[in-house]
Amino acid sequence: MAHDYIEDELSRGSVFKSEQFLSIDYVPENLPHRQAELRTLAQNFKTLITTPGRTSHKFIIEGPVGSGKTAVAKRFTEQLVQAADRRSIRLHNIHINCRINKTAYLVFLRALREFKPKFPRRGHSPEELLQMLVEILDEEDRYLLLILDELDYFIRQRGSDILYDLTRLTDDRLNARQRVSIIGIGRKIPLDETSLDSSTLSTLQRNILRFSKYDRNALYDILLNRVEMAFEENVVMEETIQVISDIASERGDARYAIELLWRSGKQADSTQAQNVVPDYARQAKADTHPELRKEVFSTLSQMHRILLLAIARQLKETRGAYVTMGEVEEMYRSSCEEYNEEPRAHTQIWEWVQDLTSHGIIDTKRSGSGQRGQTTLIGLSDVPAEMLEQFITSLLDSQEM
Ligand SMILES: Nc1ncnc2c1ncn2[C@@H]1O[C@H](COP(=O)(O)OP(=O)(O)OP(=O)(O)O)[C@@H](O)[C@H]1O
Ligand SMILES: [Mg+2]
């Protein structure tokens, strides 16, 4: 009989009990060290339930990477909708990732499809979509809490018109019921004084909830919770959790801390060790970088990825902090060949460079005059070029058929 690799793998011991509790999409029931923030949100939004339709809420959550913004918003809105349900108030929450739904049109379409799943993709303007959304909410006596996640990215790309549209929507309806409330989330939301009227601007500025980065004690508590959920008893050494909290506290990033924990466990499994020792955490630190966030890179198109690969390779080759646009384009053409893609023209590549800059993955600046003539210089925000190259290569390879 042929060797059964599946059964082999299944019968092998693992330090994990339920690995899925370490996945990036999982939001735990309890969010240690964010109780105060959850309470603040509850205090601000409770009128959606006590006096539905009276006011429209606009709120902003700001804070560094991995500080629990998305997790808190998800937990909070879930509880709010449940509380509304218990009181027969038809409140819906829609969580929109603005890195994926990149235009106002796509955001409104996504919201509309919550209620009309088969709504056609084309044939309407964004304003019409918004209007239809409100009509449906009115007709069916529903309320909507719209979470615009990664809004800072969206505004850097498109400006803050979307906030203007959404707030005008409520202001125009002074005597009607207020159907739509919003929570915008981002690291730092650029509130643009030219495209927002002063009352919207001041409302938003008054309603900013700022998350601080987690310190090592907070990270320790978050990790301890996950260890209990995801690992077999007593396999993760206390010292390992300490080491990970220390490493991740530099940025205060819970996502990075959890990734290090997961990788440490994987390391234990692959060496068939019984315990997750501190050294695996140190190894994990060397193998990954907090800026290599899967949720961000998975939203990039194939062409963006190839361009990024070219940038990483060129930077690796020249060993400088920056490379020129011309150098990148040359490397890009050879990378395209490797992946059987038709290389695109300069203007298109230029646009992708802008995209990658708004994502915060690369840095661009104009070269000083006299240096190499006026040209755009491209660098990486923080990740070592070689690590990025490896990461992108594995992304590109994993999707090849
Ligand atoms: N207080 C907490 N308790 C438990 N897990 C947490 C806590 N805060 C964050 N996490 C976990 O850490 C990871 C990152 O959190 P989250 O996605 O909310 O960060 P974020 O602030 O939205 O970051 P980004 O700016 O990158 O979007 C998630 O897996 C989340 O479940
Ligand atoms: Mg987030």
Image (cartoon, rainbow, N blue to C red):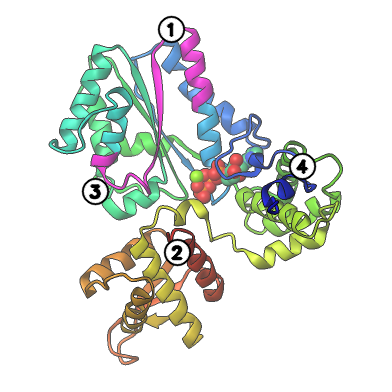
On the image, the x and y values in percent for residue 211 come to 56, 43
Relative to 183, is 239 on the left or the right? right
* Amino acid type shown at disc 4: Phe
Q: Are marks 2 and 3 in contact (CB under 8 Å)?
A: no
Can you say whether 365 is above or below 81 in the image?
below
From the Cβ of disc 4, is ligand 1 less than 8 Å away?
Answer: no
Q: Are marks 4 and 1 in contact (CB under 8 Å)?
A: no
In this image, 159 relative to 318: left or right?
left
In-front residue for pair 93/35: 93
| Residue on which the image places disc 4 | 231
Mark 3: give few (<14), some (14-19) or many (20+) Cα within 10 Å.
Answer: few
Q: Residue at x 61, y 49 (%)?
A: 255
Q: Which residue is mark 1?
A: 88
Picture quarter containing residue 340? Answer: bottom left
Nearer mark to the viewer, of 1 and 3: 1
Determine contact: label 4, label 2, CB under 8 Å.
no
Residue 361 lies in the magenta stretch: no
From mark 1 to mark 3, how far is it between C-alphas?
Answer: 40 Å
Badge 2 or badge 3: first in the primary sequence: 3
Counting residues from the start of the chain, the first of labels 1 and 3 encountered is 1
Name the residue carrying label 3.
Answer: 194
Q: Left or right: 236 with respect to 378?
A: right
Foreground label between 2 and 3 = 2
Query: Going from the N terminus, do you reach mark 1 or mark 2 first?
Result: 1
**Residue 18: x %, y % from top left:** 70, 38
Q: Which residue position is annotated with label 2?
A: 396
CA gap between label 1 and label 2 equals 48 Å
Q: Is mark 1 within 8 Å of ligand 1?
A: no
Q: Amino acid at mark 2?
A: Leu
Let me know if residue 196 appears in the view. Answer: no
Q: Earlier in the sequence, mark 3 or mark 4?
A: 3
- Secondary structure at numbered mark 4: loop
